[in-house]
């Protein structure tokens, strides 16, 4: 029976990996910039606390946010966690309002204790998403009745398949690392067309394909106050580096009468990169019932260039610019309450979670700061109990996110996150009478 369960878990991980990679997870026009809309990179239980995770240490969950936490995984269990989400987004700009919906699988992760004080985790997580389609219309001049239309569209995103380890070097101090294979692509287009049949159509297509690595290292210091109370400090460092990708821009001018096209192709060598990321946090565990904490994250996007098509003195080019981004900061406060996670009573094992976060803009759009993000979340960890297992959890949370950039587009996102954590006693030695 145990071997069948292991085979099922591995097969499910592979199947969901394909589904995760197939989703783009966004309808935001802001995903037309940079590598797309950046993912939270949080599991179902983190999302209910606003993404809190640097100091979170609990052997019943896989905490991807800090790989040092893997050392706390129970020695008798195999943890398997899969998550999905659905969202409604309300867009507003210059009095125009639109709604959009989407839903997708987000992540699948697993974890187990390999050796004493050494936990292992592996899985697939999102990194960024690209997904949008919109257009704008304007008149050419004040008298001419010619209308020109700009049509914008984009799809794609980046994903990471990771293998991580967390080792408690000595009591209360753990180190960890996540090594990831980062892959994905994006396709973006801008098509400029005219109602006048004598004017050429101009199309620009931006593409890139990424296959590289991602490395994140973490540490946790656990300071006990009593048998069940402690303070945990968490830190992570994400390595910034070039992605070894040559992004491409194709500019196609099409004669509207003859349909003859003239194509120019531009490339930038090694033109994409990811930033150095520094994170830190603290979590207070009171008697094993209440966990409250705060996180801070700094993504150093300000030092990363990005390719842009431009025409200077009539000469077109596709070059790296270093004024597309600024450093991104995220502040998170959240917590979790559970009356008694070891109880057999359903209500005692129910987890209540809440969190808030604020994220500064990292995009610079036409010389103006991109959107700030304000988020509030709340949720539950619902125990799945039967005669064989009382450790698995259904994590459900609701999240509201507002993206505001002043005079630019505003977004209000209402999201439902669902994660199921299967916590099985695979490694327990059973006695049969």
Image: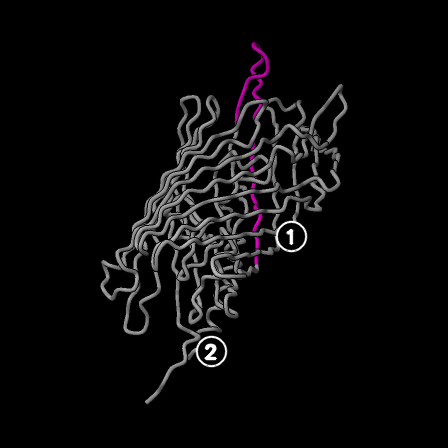
Q: Which segment is the magenta one? A: 136-162
Query: In the figure, residue 365 lies in which quadrant?
Result: top right
Q: Residue at x 43, y 74 (%)?
A: 426
Q: Residue at x 39, y 28 (%)?
A: 97
Q: Quadrant of the C terminus?
A: bottom left
Separation of residues labelled 2 and 1 (CA atoms): 32 Å
2 or 262: which is nearer to us? 2
Q: Quadrant of the N terminus?
A: bottom left
Q: Which mark is residue 213?
A: 1
Residue 322 lies left or right of residue 297; in this view the side is right
Q: Position of residue 172 (x, y in %)?
A: 47, 57
Q: Which mark is residue 3?
A: 2
142 or 115: which is nearer to us? 115
Q: Residue at x 70, y 26 (%)?
A: 310
Residue that sits furthest to the front in the current view:
225
Residue 288 lies left or right of residue 409; in this view the side is left
Q: Position of residue 28 (x, y in %)?
A: 48, 36
Density class for disc 1 (Cα within 10 Å; few <14, some 14-19, many ≥20) is some
Magenta-drawn stretch contains 384: no
Magenta-drawn stretch contains 143: yes
Residue 351 lies left or right of residue 375; in this view the side is left
Q: Position of residue 323 (x, y in %)?
A: 64, 28
Q: Is residue 313 above or below residue 75?
A: above
Q: Magenta span: helix, strand or loop, mainly?
A: strand
| Residue 271 in sight here | yes
First in residue order: circle 2 vs circle 1? 2
Query: In the figure, residue 427 lies in which quadrant?
Result: bottom left
Residue that sits furthest to the top in the current view:
143
Where disc 1 sits, the SS reads strand
Density class for disc 2 (Cα within 10 Å; few <14, some 14-19, many ≥20) is few
């Amino acid at each position: 029976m145990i071997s069948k369960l292991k085979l099922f878990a591995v097969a499910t991980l592979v199947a969901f990996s394909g589904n995760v990679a197939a989703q783009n997870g966004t309808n935001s026009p802001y995903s037309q910039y940079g590598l797309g809309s950046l993912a939270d990179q949080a599991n179902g239980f983190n999302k209910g606390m606003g993404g809190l995770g640097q100091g979170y240490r609990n052997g019943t969950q896989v905490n991807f946010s800090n790989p040092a936490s893997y050392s706390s995984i129970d020695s008798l269990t195999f943890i398997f966690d899969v998550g999905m989400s659905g969202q409604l987004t309300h867009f507003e700009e210059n009095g125009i309002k639109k709604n959009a919906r989407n839903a997708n699988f987000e992540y699948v992760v697993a974890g187990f204790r390999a050796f004493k004080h050494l936990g292992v985790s592996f899985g697939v997580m999102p990194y960024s998403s690209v997904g949008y389609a919109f257009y704008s219309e304007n008149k050419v001049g004040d008298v001419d009745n010619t209308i020109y239309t700009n049509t914008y569209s984009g799809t794609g995103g980046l994903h990471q398949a990771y293998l991580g380890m967390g080792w408690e070097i000595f009591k209360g101090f753990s180190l960890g690392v996540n090594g990831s294979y980062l892959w994905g692509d994006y396709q973006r287009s801008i098509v400029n067309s005219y109602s006048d049949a004598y004017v050429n159509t101009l199309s620009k297509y931006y593409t890139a394909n990424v296959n590289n690595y991602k490395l994140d290292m973490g540490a946790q210091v656990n300071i006990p106050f009593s048998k069940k109370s402690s303070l945990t400090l968490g830190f992570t460092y994400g390595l910034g580096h070039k992605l070894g990708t040559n992004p491409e821009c194709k500019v196609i001018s099409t004669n509207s009468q003859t349909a003859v096209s003239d194509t120019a192709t531009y490339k930038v060598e090694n033109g994409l990169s990811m930033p150095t990321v520094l994170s830190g946090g603290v979590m207070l565990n009171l008697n094993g019932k209440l966990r409250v904490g705060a996180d801070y994250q700094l993504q150093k996007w300000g030092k990363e260039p990005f390719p842009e098509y431009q025409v200077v003195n009539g000469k077109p080019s596709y070059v790296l610019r270093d004024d597309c981004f600024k450093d991104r900061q995220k502040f998170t406060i959240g917590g979790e309450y559970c009356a008694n996670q070891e109880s057999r009573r359903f209500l005692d094992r129910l987890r209540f979670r809440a969190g808030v976060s604020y994220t500064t803009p990292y995009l610079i759009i036409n010389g103006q700061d991109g959107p700030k993000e304000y988020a509030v979340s709340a949720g539950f960890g619902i125990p799945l109990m039967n005669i064989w297992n009382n450790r698995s959890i259904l994590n459900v949370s609701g999240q509201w996110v507002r993206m505001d950039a002043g005079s630019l587009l505003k977004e209000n996102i209402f999201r439902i996150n669902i994660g199921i954590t299967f916590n099985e006693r695979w490694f327990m030695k059973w006695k049969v009478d």
